[in-house]
Amino acid sequence: MARAKTAKRKSLPSKRRTAKKFKAVKQGPVTGPEPDWIHDLPLDNLVNAITALAGEVYILRERQRAMERELNRRDVLPLGAVEDHAPTPAEREVDTADLKAFVHRLWSEIARTREPWANVDPKVTKYFKQPK
Amino acid sequence: MPDSGFETRRNERDELRVRESRDFRAYQDYLRVTRTFMEGPLVQSMHKNYMAALGGRKAPKTQQDVWPVVDDLLEFQLYSWAYRHLQRFKYHRPDVGIFAAVDADAERLAAELDAVAATAGDRLKLNPKIKLPEYYRMVDFHQHSGGVYSDAMDGVAYELGRRTTTPSHADPNLMYRMSFQQFPDRQYKRALDWGTGHGQGLLEWQKLHPESECHGVDISAPCLKLAYKRSREAGYSMRFAQMDLEHLEYPDNHFDVAFHLFMFHEIPPVNLAAMLKELHRVLKPGGIFAGPEFHIHPTDPFLQVIQTSHSWTNNETYASSWYALDFKKAAKKAGFSKVSVTPFAPRAEGKAGMSASYWNFYLLEK
């Protein structure tokens, strides 16, 4: 399928109507390096999202603290047991692996390359034609 | 060789399941709800700001004129990112993605699939020498790396992927039942699930039509092995075969009914036209071929743009060509005497009123 030309009609309100390339709109398969999809996300929104996530984390912290206290009151867990918890060597290995995996999950996103994870052959457009 | 012995049959009834960690389940739930938000409230907000961007002027009448406007909308950029990357997260995230979960369990899962396949005899016909069509190899559909044919676990991963795939989160098989309700109320002696995948559609068909001799055809061997396993778990005797849908190895006038679910948009139009001819050949006179399929909204170019964008964001590469196909003409040319295309619009529970997703139900009669 031939790449559609960008509309140039004056009646359109977008200041980008004469741009050669859209920002997020794609008019063909992604066959090369991974493109950027987001161009206009205000930094405020990013900070909003991080702050919102921090709030969610605090909710979890508060719930965990309450749970520890309740467990203590029911004589299930001595006060400070979690704070003073000493893992066995085997548990420490598990914890270390878990922490590494956690860090990897986070940083694999921050340090992502543009290498595609799923491919489309650039010659695929020959299959876009209609039957006669 | 048919299976023999109680022990084998009993094991076949054990459901093959991927071991899902608590983290995996929580993460996939999170993705599912995020996707629901993206396809509902985010699209609504996008539309509101799209109208505002027009500034009271007349709405554009063509997709070409809508694209530059939506391109400036933050919601559309986020939507495009989400369509692309939530799917990547679903499959590819370390530890909590589908491939990680399946790969961690691959040896056991493969052994279970192989054990059941080994007793299938002619109920599971795989063709290791099959030539996969070029168009099929060219695209990693739905961003499933390597397609659904290159790894022994691809069928399992594909089936597990239904968890976060709209439209039926709660019951992935609901869509099959809603589709089958649209079929003429008849007794169907022999049925073909065309592009059977993991086989769940055929299982649902057999529940509704115990009179049917059930066949499933697909080009993916990993999917067929899983489909066969699922049929044995359900206690059904079904037949599955690996074939190119353009060259069905069934006799003429063989099936009373053939059905599919959302297959057309994954096939180039020229190949689909050839497949329709082949379907016409294997159906009995009066036999039907039917199923639902995505399409673009018939009149609203804004929704058309949103739906078309999935072609590129989610590697549904042939979808935009499918939207351009004159299907009725192709079906008539294939020989079908009756062709009906009607809107098919059941909404998944909890989905917002505005959605770019538009479905038709296609019913063809030989």
Image (spheres, coloured by chain):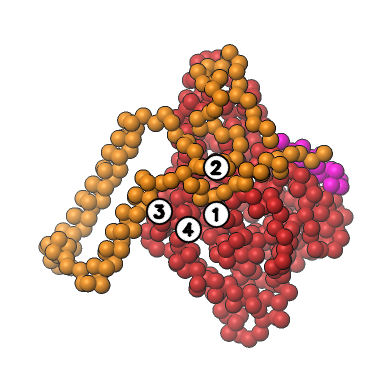
Mark 3 residue element:
helix
* Kind of residue indicated by mark 3: Tyr
Do the residues at discs 3 and 4 belong to one chain? yes
Mark 2 residue element:
loop
Q: Residue at x 56, y 17 (%)?
A: A12
Label drawn at residue B27: 3
* Kind of residue indicated by mark 1: Ser
Q: In orange, which chain? A: A
Tell me the mark number nearer the camera, choosing from 2 and 3: 2
Label drawn at residue B145: 1
**Prevailing SS of the magenta stretch:** helix
Tell me the mark number nearer the camera, choosing from 3 and 4: 4
Do the residues at discs 1 and 4 belong to one chain? yes
Q: Residue under label 2, please give it.
A: A32
4 and 2 marks in contact (CB < 8 Å): no
Return the disc, 1 or 4, that comes first in the chain's sequence.
4
